Amino acid sequence: MFAIPGGFVELNEPLKDAAMRELFEETNVKGIHIEQFYTFGNPNRDPRGRVISVAYIALIDSEKISLLSRADARDAQWVNIEGLPKELAFDHKEILDKALKYLRNKVEIGSSIAFQLLPKHFTLTELQHVYEIILDEEIDKRNFRKKILTLDLLEEVPYKREGAHRPAQMYEFKTKEI
């Protein structure tokens, strides 16, 4: 069955270090930002016995990172969330649903979490496109621009992107905090 990368924490290992280690061991992904989003503790969630899972989320540009199965993972691959099988290992469907809800909530309140999917310099149209993908809905261009610019997260850069129409203003993020 499909499963989210994960494993057990070593005796003297911090949780975040364990999450990063397991991600690397099973997918060869390292050096990315992850953040804890929920703890799953239903007593019957794992047939092997009582397991409490502390879940982390990361946004990764799948075009920039190639996955490689390592350690105990048989196959590591990018899968569109809408293309997942109905049944996943353990309670991983619930974990993915919670992660998506968490991500959408973060985006709606104006968190900079979505910025991880953009290049250093980008247009507001590109940023809006990322938001629309995460929220799975179209956003009015004027309302989006007004909202995002009032959050004081962006800074104009001194050049514009040339294109078929009027040159587009480029931006960068003021902070790296998520």
Image (cartoon, grey):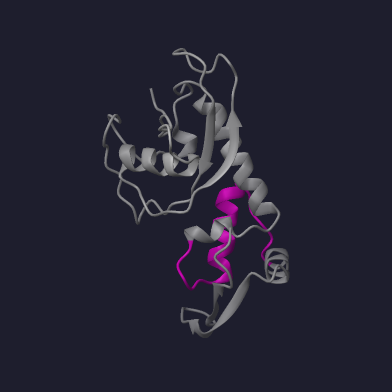
- Per the image, is 121 magenta? yes
| On-image quarter of the C terminus | bottom right
Residue 160 in picture, x, y percent from top left: 51, 83
Q: Is residue 167 above or below residue 15?
A: below
Q: Quadrant of residue 28?
A: top left
- Per the image, is 82 magenta? no
Q: Quadrant of residue 131?
A: bottom right
Residue 111 in picture, x, y percent from top left: 64, 57
Is residue 78 visible from the viewing direction of this image?
Answer: no
In the drawing, does residue 43 fall left or right of residue 31?
right
Q: Is residue 55 above or below residue 41?
A: below
In the drawing, does residue 45 fall left or right of residue 142?
left
| On-image quarter of the N terminus | top left
Q: Is residue 78 above or below residue 168?
A: above
* Numbered label tally: 0
Q: Residue at x 44, y 22 (%)?
A: 89
Q: Residue at x 71, y 54 (%)?
A: 109
In the drawing, does residue 84 fall left or right of residue 110?
left
The extreme bottom residue here reads: 158
Is residue 17 visible from the viewing direction of this image?
Answer: yes
Q: Residue at x 48, y 37 (%)?
A: 81
Residue 110 in picture, x, y percent from top left: 68, 58
The magenta stretch is 118-141
